[in-house]
Amino acid sequence: MAIFNQIRVINPTMFVETTWLDDIVTARVPLLVLRHYLTAEKRQSVVNDLEQCRERIRVSHYSNGALTTLGPYLARHTSAPENYFTALRDIQPALPPSLTVLKQDVYSWVKKSLKLEKLTTATEPALGDYAGSIVRFHADGVANPLHNDLIVRDAAGSGLAVTNILHQLSCVVCLQECSEGGALRIYKKKWHPDDEKYKVPGELGYPGSVVQDCETCEFHPHSGDIYIFNPAYYHEIDRVAGDTRITMGFFFGLTDKKMKHAIAWS
């Protein structure tokens, strides 16, 4: 019997197994990890470029926490999606080219590793392209509360293209690890509509009682790592200490039953 905390760590020369994608979708394997995907030089180059965008970083405040990001985050704009696309158009000229190159490199790796035929940034016919990635910052003392990500639920009834997906996955690149803390913890519990009774209005995420006694998988990302998991399963990030934890990531959704085509967004 598979153990939920059994992370699958791979290397660039490994043969791609046909089961990897299904294993992640079903969380038979909670996390697929490629250690040190980025060289120190390439990673530091992107981090240095991000310093030039410091004035464009935005903080979304909640009563129990905050999200600090560079680039728009769709789940924050589901009631008025046009604001997401406006924010993207406003910030796009300021984003460094190295971030676009990194995104395309990661898309290529995801396609190869999961044997996809197509992975492209999602497009909304009346509004334009979605953001293909987002950068997140977790400074000293910051944690990310227990939550899950499911755009089909969050944008239900909006008619957005991303709500037509069959499965949603999350891909993250660690650009800079923190000194201590900052572990990603995934729980063996997928979101269910009944869980909404635990939600506290105005707060980010869910209370710990929703995953009480659930099996967990804990992962400490190192600088340069890339990893994929199913974000419909509850997850959280431990409190960060020391250096800021910086990641670039995106969601991608499988659009066909054969799980060969995918679209990405932030």
Image (tube, grey):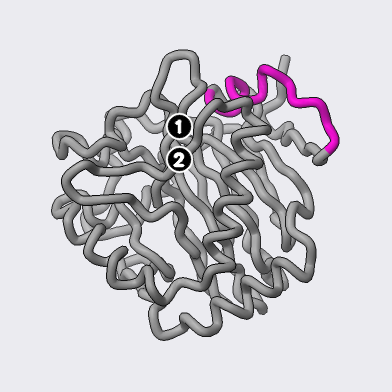
- Residue beneath the point at 49% across and 65% down: 136
Q: Is residue 154 left or right of residue 91?
A: left
Q: Which residue is mark 2?
A: 120
Q: Position of residue 88 (x, y in %)?
A: 31, 63
Does the magenta segment cover residue 239? no
- Residue beneath the point at 66% across and 64% down: 181
- Residue beneath the point at 70% across and 67% down: 43
Q: For the residue labelled by badge 2, is the local secondary structure a helix, a strand or a loop?
A: strand
Q: Which residues are magenta?
A: 13-25
Mark 2 residue crowding within 10 angstroms, few (<14) / some (14–19) / many (20+) = some
Q: Amino acid at mark 1?
A: Ala
Does the magenta segment cover residue 24? yes
Q: Position of residue 251 (x, y in %)?
A: 45, 44
In the displayed structure, would residue 126 be above or below residue 4? below
Q: Are marks 2 and 1 in contact (CB under 8 Å)?
A: yes
Comparing 8 with 236, the one in front is 8
Q: Which residue is mark 1?
A: 262
Where the N terminus falls, by quadrant?
top right
Q: Amino acid at mark 2?
A: Thr
Alpha carbon separation for disc pair 2 and 1: 7 Å
